[in-house]
Structure formats: structure tokens, C-alpha cells
Image: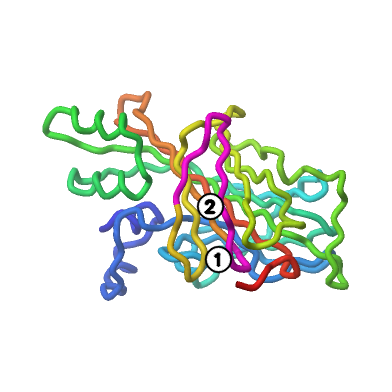
Amino acid sequence: MNLFATMCGFSARWMLASVSLVLSAHAHETWLLPSGPALAGRPLTLQLTSSMAFPKLDYALQPARVPAANLRLSGVTTELKLIKRGAHALDIKATPASPGVATAWVALPEKFISLSAAKVGEYFDEIDAQAEIREAWKKQPSPKQWREFYRKSAKAVFVVKAAGGETAVAASDNSWREPVGEDLELIPLTHLATFASGNAFVISVMRNGQPVPQFSLSLARHGAKPARTKTDDKGEATFVLDGSGPWLIYGTSLKPATRANAEWESEFATLTLTPSPQNALKH
């Protein structure tokens, strides 16, 4: 079974039924994304999926894998409890109470995976592993083994418009740029409600409340080649976001394990950004 299937929890039966699908190790992410425009007071579906190609929906996680989902809007956090597994995504229901910039997030429990030595190099390339991690693996005595505990978190930041369709965001509300409390977290620093496509968008990376310098981040958008950059000494990175969105930003933290039954520990974090359509510039 390949790495994508193992990390997402695919069954052997599903794999046998999908032999025509060619998947490469770690070439996937798990993200959370609104299924359509968000309007205040109207029901909204947030879709959680693991997929090879953003924003295509692919694999729906089991509801048991999501112990909690939350929505924060105008500084008020609401727990989202209506969760149902669809064909290609886990559907999480929400009703934003007011216009603004909303933040929704989920954190998945820790899981274990083992890799063959032949897959490790591919994994390193996918996550842009740091030189010291590659060197530590290189120096590991034979027979080499890769045992890893990993955790995933997914966050969506999106504009909620008034019921009439207009964008009305309180200038005093900056809750969208505040951490939600994940161990590894991607935080937008640019206001999404006033952002126009083609401009620079700034992201902060925090681990346990502290900035993470020289952290590798990737950017994906439908129809565009992925881009990659690193955070600066303040733990901040800048992408130029073209097109109308949505965009996916993601990164992985990998480090030696501090436990006896594994060699490695990792954290996968994703952030989707869905702007107000009226702010998108045509290219």
C-alpha cells in the first residue's frame, strides 16, 4: 500500500478497486474549504478532504478522525457538530452569524506510519526537508527503518458576505489573524476581505506560539504550478496570489522523535484562503 493511502486511512479493498489510480508518496495534502460562497445567516458546508490535486475533492476521512471542528468569526468561536461523510469529503455544517473574515479549523489525532527506505528520499523532496534531517537519515546505521508519528491540522480562512451579497467587515475585527492554538499553525497577516488578486499576501508560521524561521511553505492553486518559499527570521513568508482563488498554503515540520517506538515525528499544516469574489482581478 502506498504512502498516500496509508496516511489517509484507505482500506485494502478500496485500493484493489482503484488499481487504475497512480498515487505517489506524500504528493497529497489534507485541507478544509467552503463548498461555495459564505453568506451571513445562511447554511454553509465546509469540506475536509485529502487529495492529490487542489482543489479537487478526493478522499473523505472518517468522522471519527475529526474529534472537533470550530469556526471563529468576529472573535466568537463556535463548535461545529454536524459532520457527515460524503463521497469525496467530510461535510462540516456551519452557519456564519455575521459578515466578516471567518476562520474554521480541525486537528486530527496522531497516527503512526512506517516507510521503506526507498520512499524516504521522495518524502524528503515532497516536504522540502531540511539538510540536517536528510543528514541524520543518511547517518542512521543499517538496517535503516523509518517509523513516524504524524499529526495533521487544517484551517480555512474565508470571507463571509452579508445576506444581500455585499462585503461588510468591521475594521476593528482582527480575530482572523490570531492563532487558534494548534501546535504548528499557518496564520494570515494580510486582510482577506480587502485583498486583490495579483498582490503580495503575508503568512506567519507559529509553533507553540513562537515564530518558525526558515520553514518551507508551498502554494497551490487550480491550474497553476505549485510555488515554494521559506519564512524569514520573523517566521513570515510572502506569496503573490494570482487568479481568483481559492489558494492552498501548506508545510510540514519533521524532527527526530523523543520516544522509543519511533525515529521521527511530524506535523502537517494547511491553510486555504477564499477571498471575496469582487476583489479578484482578472488576468
Total marks in image:
2
Residue 211: quarter of image = top right
Tell me, yes or no, whether the highlighted magenta stretch contains residue 261: no
Nearer-the-camera pick, 153 or 12: 153
The single residue placed furthest to the left in the displayed view is 142
Q: Residues within 10 Å of mark 1 (few under 14, many from 20)?
A: some
Query: Where, quadrant-wise, is the N terminus in this rendering?
Result: bottom left
| Residue stretch in magenta | 228-246
Residue 243: quarter of image = bottom right
Nearer-the-camera pick, 151 or 37: 37
- Tag 2's secondary structure? strand
Horizontal arrangement in the rendering, residue 20 relative to residue 157 (left or right): left
Nearer-the-camera pick, 44 or 233: 233
Alpha-carbon span between mark 2 and mark 1 = 24 Å
Q: Disc 2 or 1, which lies upstream in sequence?
A: 1
Nearer-the-camera pick, 223 or 160: 223
Q: Which mark is residue 85?
A: 1
Q: Which mark is residue 249?
A: 2
**Residue type, label 1:** Arg
Tell me, yes or no, whether the highlighted magenta stretch contains residue 229: yes
- Tag 1's secondary structure? strand
